[in-house]
Amino acid sequence: MPRRTDGQPEEQTKGRARRRLSREERLPADIAAILKHLEDFLNGTDEEGRKVCDCTWGIYAFFDYDDEPIYVGQTYESLRTRIRRHLTNQRTDAVAMHVLDPMEVAYIAVWPLWDLAGLTPEERMDLLNRAEYTAYEELTRQARVSKLLNEKAPAPTDLIDLPKMYKGVIVPDDIRQRLAHADERIARRASTIANLAQVAKERDVSLGLRETLVTQAQRLELLARRRLEEVRGETPSQELLSETRRSGAENADAESDD
C-alpha cells in the first residue's frame, strides 16, 4: 500500500478525507422532503410561543390522504418523541407488525395536555386515558369504516373536553399529488395487508390484530371500489360506504360484547 511521508497509508488518508453524506443526501428525495415537513410540524408553536409537540403528555392522531382518521395514540414521553418513533426509523409495534403504514400518513393532529404537569402520576394517567378514549371515539365516528387501525382500542371511560387541537400536513404538495393517487395507495395498502396476514400466519397474534386485518381489508375495498367507479366515470356510490360503515359498526359491537 502506498505510504505518505508522514507514515500514514495514502488510502487511509483519502478515506478520512471523504465527506460523509448528510441525512438528506442519504435518503430518497421524497422521504427527505416528507421528514423535513414533519420536523416543521413538530416545531410548530401555539399562541404562547410553546412548541406544541414538546408537551410531555398528549394525544396524537394520524390521517390518510383523504383526511380519514386511521390511528390514535397517547404519550407521556413527549408528542415529538412518540410521533417520531412511528414515522421515522425508530420503529414501533404498530409499524413493525404492519398495522400502520407510515407512507399512508398525510396529516397529523395533536392535543397537548399541558395542564397535567401539576397533577400526581395517578391523576395524569387517568386524564391521559380519558383524553385518548375521547379522541378515539370522536375519530371513530368520523371514519368511513367506523373503525381505526389501533390493534387495541382504548379502555372505555368517561369522556372529557379535549384541549385545542393542532393539525398539519406533513407531505409536500408535489409529492402528495403522486402518493395520494388511488392506484398508488391501493398497491401500498394491499402490500400492507399481505404483510399483516403473513404476521398472523406465523405468530400467535392477538384478536385485535386480526380485527385490524379486517379493517385494512375494508379500507382497501372502499378505495378500490371508488377507483373503479372513477375509471368508469361513475358517480361515487353511497351503497358501499353504507355497507362498510355497517360492517365496521357490527365489528365494534361484537368487540364491546367481548
Image: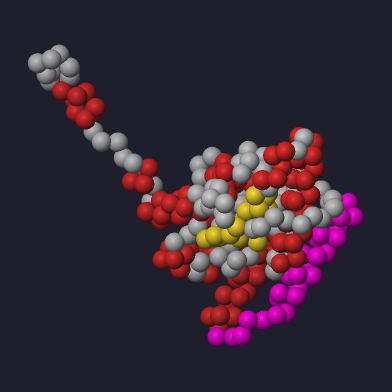
Q: How is the image coloured?
A: secondary structure
Rendered residue at 24%/27% (across/down): 16
Q: Is residue 211 above or below residue 79?
A: below
| 165, 37: nearer the viewer | 165
Query: In this view, which residue lies farthest toward the left?
Result: 5
Q: Is residue 176 magenta?
A: no
Which image quadrant is residue 165 in?
A: bottom right
> In the image, residue 126 lies at what x, y percent?
80, 43
> In the image, residue 82 lies at what x, y percent?
60, 43
Is the stretch drawn in magenta largely helix, strand or loop? Answer: helix
Q: Does 39 sit left or right of 74 as displayed?
A: left
Which image quadrant is residue 190 in?
A: bottom right
Quadrant where the N terminus lies? Answer: top left
Q: Is residue 94 above or below residue 176?
A: above
Q: Does 57 sit left or right of 26 as displayed?
A: right
Rendered residue at 79%/55% (across/down): 160
> In the image, residue 80 lies at what x, y percent?
56, 44
Magenta stretch, residue numbers = 233-258
In the rendered image, is residue 221 in sight? Answer: yes
Number of marks: 0
Query: In this view, which residue lies farthest toward the front?
Result: 48
Q: Is residue 139 above or below residue 9?
A: below
| 143, 230: nearer the viewer | 143
Q: Is residue 240 magenta?
A: yes
Rendered residue at 21%/23% (across/down): 12
Rendered residue at 61%/85% (across/down): 235
Query: In this view, which residue lies farthest toward the bottom?
Result: 234
Query: In this view, which residue lies farthest toward the right?
Result: 257
In the rendered image, is residue 87 in sight? Answer: no
> In the image, residue 97 lies at what x, y percent?
63, 45
Q: Is residue 74 above or below residue 244?
A: above
| 224, 39: nearer the viewer | 39
